[in-house]
């Protein structure tokens, strides 16, 4: 009888321990179940250190170099289409002048955004979000930045609509039902989307529209340092806090990690800065020179 009692006690304790571990796992992952693990390399506007920013050449090069994600910026055209360009004007990256929303998608797609000094990059153009998703969804992660949200009412809904459409193409649940385990793992590891913005209201809205997509808050210099109250508010709807690397220190990284969130550093351009970020324990970097 005593032997059975001891066995029952051991099993009881084992079950309790298992339950505690499960609960801890749920607590840690509940806020961002689709957040990728490990140190993440994100190609800033594609491999923009060696190719024209936010172009298919830059994204293709980032993929070739083995980047985990490509980062790119989304604005809206005159006819309400989502286009990939950093500035709210076309002045810096094309031969044209004017605001992005002065032009239709077709007009923007006809503009040369390439590097005239490099023959293989001379004919690059402004591209649509749809085109980037069609080419790279499922092949490399995507960090989508919603730019100038106040200029484009409804841009969050439009981004959410495109993201939902491409989520369906890589439906992990349907693959699991068919027991295609290798395909499942490939999709889980390669297809990922994170959406970021400097506008906290915009990030909160996109989180409500896409609750299963990890959201990142970009921190500007005039918002630094973040108060404990602001951090608590941000982590209620974000999985990431993305910080200018020059502002980061161990305290900030620890504050974010203590809230079970991840921190990415931008924009890394030197090996020295990369090493410093790794010492600080950030979860990834956004860099012009991936690979």
Image: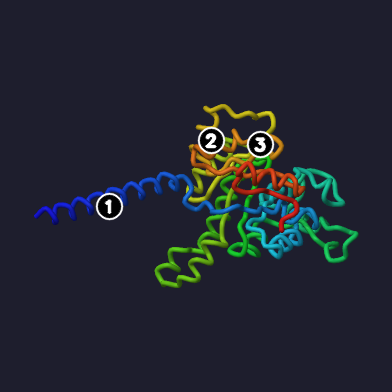
**Foreground tag (1 vs 2):** 1
The residue shown at (46%, 45%) is 31
Q: Quadrant of the C terminus?
A: bottom right
Q: Position of residue 61 (x, y in %)?
A: 74, 62
Spot the residue most to the left. Answer: 1
Give SS at disc 2. helix
Spot the residue most to the front. Answer: 2
First along the sequence among labels 3 and 1: 1
Q: Residues within 10 Å of mark 1 (few under 14, many from 20)?
A: few
Query: Could you tell me if the residues under marks 1 and 2 are in contact, i.e. CB atoms within 8 Å?
Result: no
Q: Residues within 10 Å of mark 3 (few under 14, many from 20)?
A: many
Q: Position of residue 262 (x, y in %)?
A: 55, 44
- Disc 3 and disc 2: Cα gap in Å? 17 Å
Query: Could you tell me if the residues under marks 3 and 1 are in contact, i.e. CB atoms within 8 Å?
Result: no
Q: Is residue 93 left or right of residue 209?
A: right
Q: How is the image coloured?
A: rainbow
Q: Quadrant of the N terminus?
A: bottom left
The residue shown at (20%, 50%) is 9
Give SS at disc 3. loop
Give residue 234's mark. Answer: 2
First along the sequence among labels 3 and 2: 2
Q: Is residue 181 left or right of residue 20?
A: right
- Residue located beneath label 1 in the image: 14
**Foreground tag (3 vs 1):** 1
- Disc 1 and disc 2: Cα gap in Å? 37 Å
Residue closest to the eye, 93 or 6:
6
- Residue located beneath label 3 in the image: 248
Q: Position of residue 47 (x, y in %)?
A: 74, 56
First along the sequence among labels 1 and 2: 1
């Amino acid at each position: 009888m005593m032997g059975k009692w001891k066995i029952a006690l051991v099993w009881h304790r084992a079950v309790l321990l298992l339950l505690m571990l499960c609960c801890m796992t749920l607590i840690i992952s509940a806020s961002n179940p689709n957040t990728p693990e490990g140190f993440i390399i994100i190609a800033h506007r594609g491999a923009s250190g060696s190719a024209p920013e936010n172009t298919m050449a830059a994204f293709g090069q980032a993929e070739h170099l083995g980047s985990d994600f490509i980062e790119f910026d989304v604005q809206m055209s005159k006819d309400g289409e989502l286009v990939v360009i950093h500035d709210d004007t076309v002045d810096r990256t094309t031969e044209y002048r004017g605001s992005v929303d002065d032009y239709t998608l077709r007009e923007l797609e006809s503009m040369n955004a390439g590097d005239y000094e490099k023959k293989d990059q001379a004919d690059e153009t402004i591209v649509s979000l749809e085109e980037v998703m069609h080419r790279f969804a499922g092949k490399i992660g995507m960090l989508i930045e919603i730019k100038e949200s106040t200029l484009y009412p409804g841009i969050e809904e439009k981004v959410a609509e495109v993201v939902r459409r491409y989520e369906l193409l890589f439906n992990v649940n349907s693959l699991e039902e068919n027991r295609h385990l290798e395909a499942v793992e490939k999709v889980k590891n390669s297809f990922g989307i994170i959406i970021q913005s400097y506008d906290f209201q915009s990030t909160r809205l996109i989180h409500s529209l896409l609750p299963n997509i990890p959201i990142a808050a970009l921190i500007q210099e005039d918002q630094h340092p973040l108060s404990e109250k602001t951090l608590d508010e941000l982590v209620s709807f974000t999985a990431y806090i993305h910080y200018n690397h020059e502002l980061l220190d161990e305290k900030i990284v620890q504050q974010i990690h203590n809230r079970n969130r991840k921190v990415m550093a931008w924009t890394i351009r030197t090996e020295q800065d990369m090493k410093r970020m790794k010492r600080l324990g950030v979860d990834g970097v956004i860099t012009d020179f991936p690979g």
